[in-house]
Amino acid sequence: MSAINDFLDETPSLGEKAAIFQGTSGSGNITGSAFIPLHSPLQPPSAPVPTLLKGNRKSREVDETEMRPVPNPFPELLPSTVSFVSQCLLPWTKTSATQVIKVYCEDNTSRAVEVPSDITARDICQLFILKNHCIDDHSWTLFEQIPHLSIERTIEDHELVVEVQSGWGMDSHCCLYFRKNYAKYEFFQKPLDFFPEQMVSVSSESNGIMNHSQLIQTFLSSSSCPEIHGFLHAKEHGRKSWKKFYFVLRRSGLYFSNKGTSKEPRHLQFIAEFGDSDVYTLLSAKKVYGAPTDYGFCVKASKSSSARDLKLLCADDEQTRTCWVTAMRLFKYGMQLYQNFIQPYQKQKSSPMRSISENSLVAMDFSGHKSRVIENPSEVLSVAVEEGLSWRRKSCHRLSSHGSPSASQSSMSSIAIHVAQPWFYCKLSRDEAQKLISQQGLIDGVFLVRDSQSNPRTFVLSLCHTQKIKHFQIVPVEEDGELFYSLDDGHTRFTDLLQLVEFYQLNRGILPCKLKHHCARIAL
């Protein structure tokens, strides 16, 4: 991939856009539908600050002919909102250099922010990552959702958010959502999982046999001619029926064959190109559009908001849909997508920063008369494991009553440990768990742990593998008055769910893959 790295230019920093991260003070936490101004609405940054000297009679005489602004006596209780109200009521007609946008998260809480007109989707994500103290693992994503069409898409990191909003109608009720998307750039790391061999054709000297690096270079290079082909269901224009056709995706656009699987030019009919169009996924393909499956997607012109203009398509499974959607994104944006993918890592290389643990924390041994620094890595690991187990024992001891612990007391201690973990969801149904994992990216290792609805004493591990979501019951095992948890009928036992999750993050065990990414929800 060195040729690709040499091609990329150094991306500019946020520059003046970084001011949005300093819109509020550290103590001014905003909840619900909040407004974060870049500057005072009544005092633009370029306006001079008036100064009046009480002892200067000439200044008083000049000022008597002008209307003085009335100061706000209670700024902390009643901030100035004149500009904010006008911006919210008329966001599409605003002509200044800033814009008010509203961003939602998965629990439908929202926050309104005033941003410069040239802010990108990545900048918006960075803003909410900082404001909510999230871990920046490069998977936070901004989504565009159009409720009246029941479609949504990933807004690419380099896209200007204000430009995306400019394509919305006044009464379209379109929304921006901020949430995780672990699959956003996963195809750069595991392209063979996203592009099945039977769906990809490349006119090259490799005879169709390529490693993953060659496959990605084929899509990114403008001189190559990759092709995606296969059967899809298409909704006939002006009708409710769907019909199956053989489709071909090339750099020039999307085509379907009117004669079987023929790719001859006289048999291929043009459907859409992606210069001024975007690809969306259908949120309820069966219910809203009567599709044969729920794996629907569509091509929509950027300036169109009518359902009649959608090119509606439907795949037979999730892997097929993911292949088509990913290929369309690559054909539309090309090298820009790869630049978005590596940009965070380039910044880390240009300004390397050691972690807090490397700077200030070392392993110490205080067991003897004198303290010492532990330098042996294996000894450091064993001490860390022992201290973790000791912490668990102390936590259980504090939460249980005096005397011999019973199974119920042990269960209460376990609940107290895992209930605060970000991967645990107390009241979540099977369908809600599948929806949450699907929204945050169908890649191997995305998981969550939830209460079992069928058995109140058990828990369920929901895990994604090969773009399918599987559910594993965590069964309680009682022995000698102590309660353990197990995924394999008691062969491997754990004192609490935290220990179970940590084990399967390091070991696959009976699971199809290791636990890698937990589903994360935040409230704006």
Image (cartoon, grey):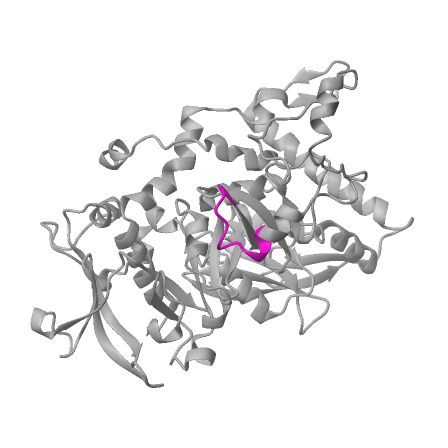
Image coordinates of residue 13 in percent, x first then y, are 43, 31
Range of residues picked out in magenta: 87-98
Q: Is residue 44 visible?
A: yes
| Along the line of sight, the residue nearer the viewer: 495 or 109 | 109
The answer to whether residue 96 is magenta is yes
| Along the line of sight, the residue nearer the viewer: 84 or 33 | 84
Q: Is residue 517 above or below residue 49?
A: below
The answer to whether residue 158 is magenta is no
Image coordinates of residue 203 in percent, x first then y, are 11, 55
Q: Is residue 312 above or below residue 351?
A: below
Q: Is residue 490 visible?
A: no
Position of the N terminus, as image quadrant, is top left
Q: Is residue 484 above or below residue 95?
A: below
| Along the line of sight, the residue nearer the viewer: 134 or 496 | 134
Image coordinates of residue 218 in percent, x first then y, are 20, 48
Is 515 situated left or right of 384 in this image?
left
Q: Residue at x 39, y 36 (%)?
A: 343
Q: Residue at x 74, y 39 (%)?
A: 391
- On the image, which quarter does residue 7 sit in? top left
